[in-house]
Every structure is written in structure tokens, then in C-alpha cells.
Image: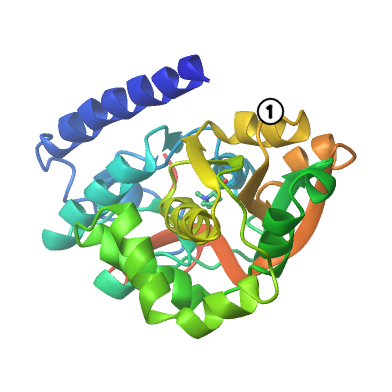
Amino acid sequence: MLTSLKRLGIIAGFSATLILAACGGGDEGENKDGSDDSSSGDVKYGEEMKYQITGIEPGAGVFKAAENAVEEYELEGWEVQASSSGAMATALGEAYDNEEPIIVTGWSPHWKFAKYDLKYLEDPKGVFGEEETINTMVREGLEDDMPEAYQVLDNFYWTPDDLEEVMLKISDGADPRDAAQEWIDENQDTVAEWTDGVDEVDGDKIELVYVEWDTEVGSTNMIGLVLEELGYDVTVTPLDNAVMWEAVATGEADAMVAAWLPGTHGDLFEEYKDELIDLGPNLEGAKIGLVVPAYMDIDSIEDLDTK
Ligand code: PBE
């Protein structure tokens, strides 16, 4: 666990340097008059952005999908830059404030759509898939060992708006636990539906695993607190994506609420589906794709200019 966490830290630090280096570049190459007809759009964003898509953790499904998109759309010379979710959000915010072009590997629900005016680039080849669900996965045997937690996890279901409320509080600076507690306090009726008829327990230990993506920080802290209120001694452990799946499949961890299906984590689900219990969607209407500021004069991945 520690090694994968460290690796993430190193990648995040490294990419922050890259992003700074990229921002420091001059604005040469601005005046190009019809020298390249590889794009149907007028604006040569590729040149301006040094043919870089600002990615997140390389273990994320959206990162792999973006790399597939570079191949499928034959985006010669383009690269998806490894980064972290936090560094991606910072880069997006800085570009947005300066009205500079940027393409990020994005997903919904996410607070960035409430803070900035953004759009998904159209994906006519369907590389990023359709609408997705976020599912809850638990280890085999959890139902017998901890029927109360199993019941709550099985009942857990909320909307993209609910999750976005928690994410917005966190992006505004709230501690994730405080943000989750506030949401719980404000949504007692919803929480009561998940815990309806479920007996309290006396300090039983349960471990939830997640990845430090904004969506999962919000959802995992929230459901962790609900289980705490029921009397559980809850540990929430951040991991790399593949390690998170493996931890639940092997029974090292008890549950996760972070399975994006059918596309984003489809490969991991295929690998582990016989070893874990899928409790179905805790949220519907999720989505991944390439996201740009609305002020950019481009609508489709197909229209990106290549090298
Ligand atoms: N995400 C957020 C994840 C799933 C949740 C879209 C960054 C991913 O791409 O794997």
C-alpha cells in the first residue's frame, strides 16, 4: 500500500514541475497562416498547448481512455500528461483565470462544472463510452460477518447533485470529514432511508478503500461517517486504482463505493468480478471525457490539430 501511495506522490510532484515549465514558455508560434491543414478547426490549439492533454493519475480509467482517444483519433504528436487529480484541477483553474486553452481528462459529477464554464469535447467514436454508474463493491463474506454494514452499503444511493454538494464544500476548503458531516446533517431523511431498520453495532472494525479522486473523497468520507454513526470503527484508506480493486477482491479491505462501470473500470471489473460482490449503483449519470473551457473555439476531439 505504502509503495503505491509514494508512487502517486512522486508522479504528482513531477507533473507539477512539468506544468510550471509549460506555463513559463513564451508565446512563439502564434502567427501561423494556413501552413497546416490537418485540422478542420481554425485555431491551432495543439501548438498553443504543446500537444499536451492534462491528465490525472495514470491508473485512472479516464487516463487510459484519453490515451486510447489519442490513438483512435490519430492525434499525431499529442500526449496525455500524467499528473494527479489535484494538480489537474490547479492547472485548469490557472488556465481558466488567464483564458488560456487547456484540455483535461474530466469527469462528472465534479465541482469544476459549478465553478467554471466548461464543456465536454464531442467524442463521435465513443472512446469514452456513454453515461456510467458508480457501483458499490464489497468483499465476499461481508454479508455474514457484518450484516448491518452490508445492509447500509446495499441501500446507499444518492444523486450526482448530492455528491456535487459535498465536493463543492471540499473544493471550497472544508475538511472532507466536515463536508461529509455537514451533508449528512442537512440530509437526514436520505440517510435515514439507508439505515432504516439496521441495528447499531459496538465498535466493529470496517475498512473502506478509495482513490483520491474528488468524487471518491466525497462519497467515501460520507458513507464512512454514516457507518461510524451506526457504531462502526471505520478506516478509510486511499490507494491506487488497481490496488483498491485488488484489496476488496482479496478481502484485505471490506468495501469500496468507487467502481465506475461499465466503461471506466471495465477491465478491472472483468478481472475481479468473480471474487467480489457487486451491490449495484450508488449513483447514476456519471460521465468521463475530455473537458475544455467553454471559451475555447472547438467542440469535438476530431477537430484537434495534429503535429
Ligand atoms: N475518475 C473518477 C476515475 C473514476 C472516478 C473518473 C477520475 C477514473 O477515471 O478511473
**Mark 1 belongs to which amino acid?**
Glu
Give the quarter of the image for residue 148.
bottom right
- What x and y, as percent, mark residue 303? 47, 61
Residue 6 visible? yes
- What x and y, as percent, mark residue 39? 45, 56
Residue occupying the far right of the picture: 274
- The count of marks equals 1
- For label 1, the SS is loop
- What x and y, as percent, mark residue 105? 45, 50
Image quarter (top left, top right, bottom left or bottom right) of the C terminus: top left
Residue 36, above or below 302: above
Report whether 87 appears left or right of 140.
left
Q: Is mark 1 within 8 Å of ligand 1?
A: no
The residue where tag 1 is placed is 252
- What x and y, as percent, mark residue 217? 43, 51
Residue 112 visible? no
Residue 46, above or below 23: below
Report whether 245 appears left or right of 104.
right
